[in-house]
Amino acid sequence: MNFDYTDEQEAFRREIREWYEENLPDGWIDGERDLPDDEDEREQFLREWQRKLHEGGWAAIHWPEEYGGRDASLMQQLIYQQEKARVNPPPERSEIGVDLVGPAIEGFGTEEQKERYLPKILSGEELWCIGYSEPDVGSDLASLQCKAVDEGDHFRINGQKIWTTHAHKADWCYMFTRTDNSGPKHHGITALIVDMDQEGVTTDRIRQITDEREFNQVYFDDATTPKENVLNEVDEGWEVAMRQLSFERISLSQSLDLERRFDELVEFCKNETRGGTPLVEDPHVREKLAEFDTRIQAAKLTYFRNVSKQMNGDLGAEASFGKLYDSEIAADLHRFRVKLGGPKAALWGDDSPNGAAKDSLANISIRIGGGTSDIQRNIIGERVLGLPKGDQE
Ligand SMILES: Cc1cc2nc3c(=O)[nH]c(=O)nc-3n(C[C@H](O)[C@H](O)[C@H](O)COP(=O)(O)OP(=O)(O)OC[C@H]3O[C@@H](n4cnc5c(N)ncnc54)[C@H](O)[C@@H]3O)c2cc1C
């Protein structure tokens, strides 16, 4: 792979850099990155940021121009990700819609669905959630039970979803339902777009270990959705789900963010002292830092290799390498931060010396969401290395 950037690519990098400098909230680039504590104010702040991104043409550069994107090449997307990792901008309000729902609608939706939903995803006017997990069904999506019954011009939906990120704020749910039980379990699943603002839908927020409440249980009791809200064909939702999960793994690749986190850790080790000596002079700390640096650089190369493969049209199981490897490094890095913080590491919020406690608790989810580490290992074993499946003799 060639690591040099062309003049055109460097110009693209400058464009996004300059846009960030002009548009990020005051002090953000210098590290003042606090979001409002109050939930409503935070929501307002994030809506405003999404609006700016959209107006600047940065809300979804990988989308086609006709739907508000920039038709960005994979190389431009990579540069954009690098710049994003560098400035660590506010979270995107429409992230789920842009990264996960949008590609599914683009790939499998009708022209009417594309025109109806895509522009409002970009502008942040409408928020989405994704309903695939159920109380007994996470990794094994094909076993899902939430039923959608054909009633002529609409489906009637009954069942429960869980861990549904942002469902309490979402306008729409992109969900998977069981429409036929008679065949193999991968068949008979239908992907539906469902209006969250209707009588048959209730959400119940779940308190997380970090004290935040981003997830929900969602109950569908005789909720309905018109037939025109089917994505792909009825009973053919498995194809949609598989394609969407590949996107999720690529978008979850966090090696570029890890590099920034590592730099912050090095800074911390330079400034924090033990017995009058900076942590960075401790041989054990130095050895660990060198080890992290090596692993992160390897993760970055793996990420580049995936991007390179994608450029050749290969969106394959290799994306699982990135997801697995990055999550493992992130978990180790956060554990090490906690260790370095000593007793003070348990402190929360502004009292915390390096934010270690909250970050390390939040990080637990990275190894679960979008397919657990065990599931990534299965995919790598079976689809990349060609090993026999666990249930085969
Ligand atoms: C940050 C985050 C955001 C999420 N957002 C959403 C969302 O918006 N919408 C949504 O629908 N869901 C969401 N989820 C749920 C997520 O998709 C599921 O938690 C995940 O797929 C795992 O499913 P599960 O929790 O049912 O665990 P299970 O599948 O029950 O797994 C339990 C344990 O068994 C292991 N295991 C299971 N099967 C196998 C196997 N075949 N081989 C080896 N080990 C196995 C798993 O690795 C795990 O350790 C989110 C989760 C997180 C953490």
Image (tube, rainbow, N blue to C red):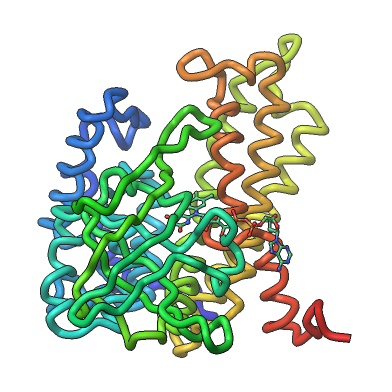
Position above or below: 365 against 312: above
Q: Nearer the viewer, residue 266 or 59?
A: 59
Task: Tell which residue pokes out farthest to the right in this image.
Answer: 393
Compared with residue 14, is residue 167 higher up or lower down, i.e. above or below?
above
Q: Position of residue 89 (x, y in %)?
A: 32, 44
Where is the C terminus found, in terms of image quarters?
bottom right
Q: Residue 19, can we see it?
A: no
Question: Which residue is found at the position 81% from the left and 85% from the top?
Answer: 388
Whether residue 297 sits left or right of residue 39 in the image: it is right
> Where is residue 166 shown, x and y percent of the image?
34, 47
Instruction: Decide if residue 192 is on the left or right side of residue 236.
Output: left
Displayed quadrant of residue 157: bottom left
| Residue 214 percent across, percent down from the top left | 40, 40
Q: Is residue 380 above or below residue 27?
A: below
Determine whether, in the image, residue 86 is placed left or right of residue 337. Answer: left
Q: Quick one: 117 or 47, which is closer to the camera?
A: 117
Q: How many marks?
A: 0
Seen from the viewer's position, the closer of residues 24 and 102 is 102
For image coordinates 11% across by 76% down, the residue present is 115
The quarter of the displayed image where residue 342 is located: top right
Q: Would residue 170 appear left or right of 277 to someone viewing this image?
A: left
Q: Is residue 11 visible?
A: yes
Place of residue 356 in the rendered image (x, y in percent of width and height, measured from the top left): 59, 28
- If the picture is divided into quarters, which one holds ligand 1? bottom right
Tell me if residue 317 comes above or below residue 87 in the rendering.
Answer: below
> What residue is drawn where x is 16% and y is 62%?
57
**In the picture, which quadrant includes the N terminus?**
bottom right
The structure residue drawn at horizontal position 33% and vertical position 28%, both measured from the top left corner, is: 34
